[in-house]
Image (spheres, helix red, strand yellow):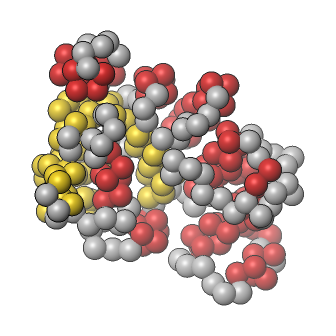
């Protein structure tokens, strides 16, 4: 059994079958990409992993803990973090505060009303946050307001906010969306570094350059069903994948 195990997951929205009998095994320490055309069910599946959606049937387990029926912050406490398509940061706060807030919440299990005064006195968390900013290449800018960052650096900041919580599993939904190629390549390099640290990653991404640069294994969704799962070099030549994903064109 992998670090994340998905068995027989189904999710309907009225008459629409968003997910149909989805099975996945994500091996610890790997980068596993989930690809497919728009509307294939990729983001719906990720939302079932983080407690945002409840499957109609099936199971989702992380390190032998069921993720179904528990709150998103409880899933986060188990060691699962998610990076969204649009970076979710506190734009009016400094980079340092952005990273200290999730570090503080992870340590105590929840945000507290008096967290700002508490955070300011937390030298240990401050040092940890500074180290995370250095790891993602944002050292020397800790006092800068997050809203002033470029799209690529906002992604770096969001990754620092996740990494400071010491996740075992990182879920990334379109991590390079809206980026220029230079920022995309920089993000790929950073994600490779994170993977080499031993963190398991599940990546949803449309950019095949990103997918084939990162993934050790790829699952392909089409109309809510897994139509293929294989090594990247085998996915490239799979005719079912070419037909479903690119209308018969080669990846």
Q: Is residue 170 left or right of residue 176?
A: left
Q: On the rendered structure, is 75 left or right of 36?
A: right
**Residue 92, image quadrant:** bottom right
**What residue is rendered at 36% in x and 49% in y?**
43
**On screen, 52 above or below 182?**
below
Q: Is residue 177 left or right of residue 212?
A: right
* Residue sitting nearer the eye, 225 or 27: 225
169, above or below 38, in the image: below
Residue 161 placement: quadrant: bottom right
Q: Position of residue 83 (x, y in %)?
A: 52, 51
Quarter of the figure that contains the C terminus: top left
Residue 186 visible at all:
no
Q: Is residue 130 above or below residue 28?
A: below
- Residue 158: tell me if it is visible: yes
Q: Position of residue 164 (x, y in %)?
A: 62, 58
Which residue corresponds to the image point at 34% horizontal and 38% vertical from the top-left?
38
For image coordinates 31% across by 64% down, the residue present is: 53
Q: Position of residue 75 (x, y in %)?
A: 40, 67
> Which sits in the foreground, 87 or 64?
87
């Amino acid at each position: 059994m992998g670090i994340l195990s998905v068995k027989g997951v189904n999710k309907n929205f009225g008459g629409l079958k968003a997910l149909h009998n989805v099975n996945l095994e994500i091996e610890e320490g790997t980068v596993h990409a989930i690809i497919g055309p728009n509307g294939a069910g990729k983001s719906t599946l990720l939302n079932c992993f983080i407690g945002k959606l409840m499957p109609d049937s099936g199971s989702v387990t992380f390190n032998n803990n069921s993720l179904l029926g528990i709150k998103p912050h409880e899933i986060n406490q188990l060691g699962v973090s998610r990076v969204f398509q649009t970076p979710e940061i506190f734009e009016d706060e400094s980079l340092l505060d952005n990273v200290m807030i999730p570090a503080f919440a992870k340590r105590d299990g929840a945000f507290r009303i008096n967290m700002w005064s508490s955070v300011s006195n937390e030298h240990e968390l401050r040092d940890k946050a500074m180290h995370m900013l250095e790891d993602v290449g944002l050292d020397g800018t800790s006092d800068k307001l997050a809203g002033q960052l470029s799209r690529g650096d906002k992604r770096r900041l969001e990754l620092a906010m996740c990494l400071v919580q010491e996740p075992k599993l990182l879920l990334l939904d379109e991590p390079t969306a809206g980026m220029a190629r230079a920022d995309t390549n920089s993000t790929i390099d950073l994600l490779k570094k994170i993977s080499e640290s031993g963190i398991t990653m599940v990546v949803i991404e449309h950019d095949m350059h990103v997918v084939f640069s990162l993934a050790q294994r790829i699952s392909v969704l089409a109309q809510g069903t897994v139509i293929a799962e294989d090594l990247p070099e085998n996915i490239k030549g799979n005719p079912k994948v070419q037909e479903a994903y690119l209308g018969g064109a080669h990846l």
